[in-house]
Amino acid sequence: MIARPAGAAAVLVALAACTSPVAPSPASPVGTIEVAARAAHSATVLDDGTVLIAGGCVVDGCGVGSVDAFALTGSSAIAVGSMGAPRDVHTATLLQSGDVLVTGGFSAEGQPPLASAEVFDAATGSWRPVDALATQRGGHAAALLGSGRVVVAGGWVRSRTYTATTEVFDPATGSFSPGPDLPAAADGLEAVALEDGRVLVTGGQSAPGVASDQAVLIAADGTSLDATGPLGTARFKHTMVSLDDGRVLVIGGTTDDIELLTSTEIFDPATGRFEPGPTLLHGRYKMSGGATLLPDGRVLVGGGGEGVEVIDVEAGVSTKATAASGVASFGTISVSGSLVLMVGGYDERIGLTGRFLAVPIADL
């Protein structure tokens, strides 16, 4: 059972010191371990409600990726088996079995992207290797298809070069097969599963500092795609959240790697069109994993920008989340039971933090 913080107050705990020139947070054990400050990690809500945190940058500037993984609740962080390779800017996708597929990413700044992939076994807390991707990639996107397979799309493959290829992972064989090519090569793109089993892929950087407005729907079996959209605003390093009514909220990002967008868009699968959504309080980018759907249908956003805000799509507004104020940005945000768990990210000086904030949903 996930422990709830006493009263209505949020619980803020520094997970560990940051080994960087930035003034570190004091080391503080949570549960049975200490966890280094991090960003560009993944957070996956497992079937039992715990959140699997894997990898990430653990040195400012992403000079080193991490192999660490831990299972997080509102009151503890319990070490699980280490990944087979250090990685950040990877993808992590919950499979129908309850296990988690992790693909690609980077081992360190200046190193080529990874082709390796591995699966976290939720029953044993260990990792097992699976066949490698045909194309090494980081900054790519991935989502679960209705068939139970996983599509991996786009990504950075080498300096100033991106890929339009997709690959489809089959959990039954532990291998990848070629999927349909995207209209344009891109990294910093996003993917999200739709209710009908298809996957929506949007945006991305098609050249350094050049955003794409592409939007495609990949079939539930991963064998074909159809163009849709396009996005109202070309963007990359954004995020997407599926809403309760089957629509998708597209949030933030950047058009040029300089300006941070405050705009959102709402995709309707019934029409294949994007319409303007509520305006954010602050521009945000580098947002993958930095937003989540709350049980009441609102969307909590805390990645890639100042503080944390709550988007009410129906009311068309975004408001400050006072229960999570005073933080530059969080790396990942996840709903676990009655709590929202926010992990890592950056401070006002763009230094990595080890912040762990557990906020009762009722306070948001």
Image: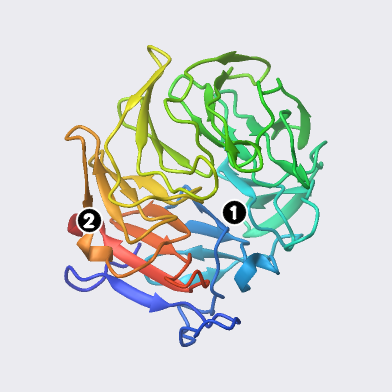
Give the residue number, with chain letter if any, for mark 1.
Answer: 123
Image quadrant in which the N terminus is located:
bottom left
Q: Callout 2: 10 Å neighbours few (<14), some, many (20+)?
A: some
Amino acid found under the numbered disc labelled 1: Ala
Observer able to see residue 68: no
**In front of the other: label 1 or label 2?**
2
The disc, 1 or 2, on the residue closer to the chain's N-terminal end is: 1
Numbered circle sitting on residue 320: 2
Observer able to see residue 296: yes
The residue sitting at 56% across, 75% down in the picture is 36
Total marks in image: 2
Instruction: Specify whether 310 is left or right of 331.
Output: left
Instruction: State yes or no: discs 1 and 2 in contact (Cβ < 8 Å).
Output: no
Residue 93 coordinates in the image, percent (x, y): 58, 42
Amino acid found under the numbered disc labelled 2: Lys
Instruction: Specify whether 288 is left or right of 308.
Output: right
Numbered circle sitting on residue 227: none
